[in-house]
Amino acid sequence: MSWFKRVEKGIVTPTEQKKETPDGLWYKCPECKTVSPMVEHKRLQFTCAKCNHHARIDSAEYFEVLFDNNQFTELDAELSSADPLHFVDTKAYPQRIVATQHQTGLRDAVRTAHGQLNGLDLVVACMDFKFIGGSMGSVVGEKIARAIDYARQHRVPFLMISKSGGARMMEAGYSLMQMAKTSAKLAMLSEAGIPYISLLTDPTTGGVTASYAMLGDFNISEPGALIGFAGPRVIKETIGKDLPKDFQSAEFVLEHGFLDFIVDRKNLKAQLTDLLTMLRPASEVLIETLPLQRSLRTAGTA
């Protein structure tokens, strides 16, 4: 059958006519190595269809997952880090900030916004790991503190999505101060009776774990997330012993009582809706049901 015969040997297609597969069409799971279309991966909210590995996503994706129709109002969007210590390593800190802003399109390592989740008002602060490892500097602490103030003033529940390598070394003590500031703001939120839910994602480490990430009325996590203070290598070298299997994984942390539950990202919006509905003050529920009660009484008398 002549159509199976190669008439000419070698590759004869001109270079300008060659077609390369465009980037971003396929996703290869780092755990099970399954390759799937990026459209399918996004439909599953960036989880693997085979092993359910949860890929790291940024604030833009979380806002799209959580806020109804991706509609929200961002808070303090223009805040940017200063250089209080005149810090220089391989480059000056202001240069590193500007370069990272241009590379990521972000102003700093956290974005805050308010909107609605299944019709329920919610304030969300979400960290971005791609901005200097999601490190906590003065801007991160200030934006979270202001978001908590907004939640307290408007009596709206607060959700913190943590993803961080810890304190930002370029700001040293200024960074560590954010642990106390955000913790104090959360104490005020608690005194006001406003719910606070903390979602820990991969990775949540360092001073973030030691402050606001672990102070929620509910501390929840995504499957497989790395959660801890110091890294496993540092701990192993310090204590001189081998660490347990899956040490500092979300499942290990849950088993030892530091999490309330682990939630699949595909179920996150539904479970947050259940939590927020359960945590709503009884007075608000009563006010909303009064019109229904009046209509039922009117119907009964008729």
Image (spheres, rainbow, N blue to C red):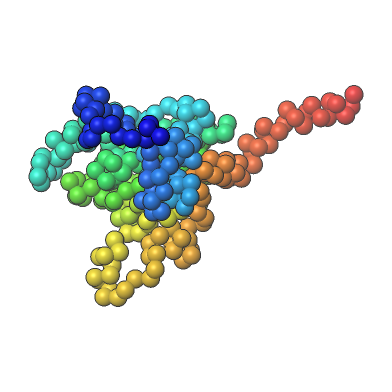
Residue 140 seen anywhere in this rendered image of the structure: no
From the viewer's side, name the closer residue of 277 and 4.
4
Residue 262 seen anywhere in this rendered image of the structure: yes
Residue 128 placement (x, y as % from top left): 33, 40
From the viewer's side, name the closer residue of 198 and 8.
8
In this picture, residue 227 sits left or right of residue 170: right
Q: Quadrant of residue 8?
A: top left
In this picture, residue 88 sits left or right of residue 63: left
In this picture, residue 32 sits left or right of residue 108: right
In the picture shown, does residue 266 fall above or below 243? above
Name the residue at 53% across, 40% down: 269
Q: Quadrant of residue 206?
A: bottom left
Q: Residue furthest bottom?
A: 241
In this picture, residue 19 sits left or right of residue 54: left
Give the quarter of the figure containing the C terminus: top right
Residue 129 placement (x, y as % from top left): 31, 44
In the picture shown, does residue 118 fall above or below 194? above
Name the residue at 27% across, 34% down: 104
How many numbered badges does the structure rendering display?
0
From the viewer's side, name the closer residue of 230 and 51.
51
Give the quarter of the figure containing the N terminus: top left
From the viewer's side, name the closer residue of 4 and 120.
4
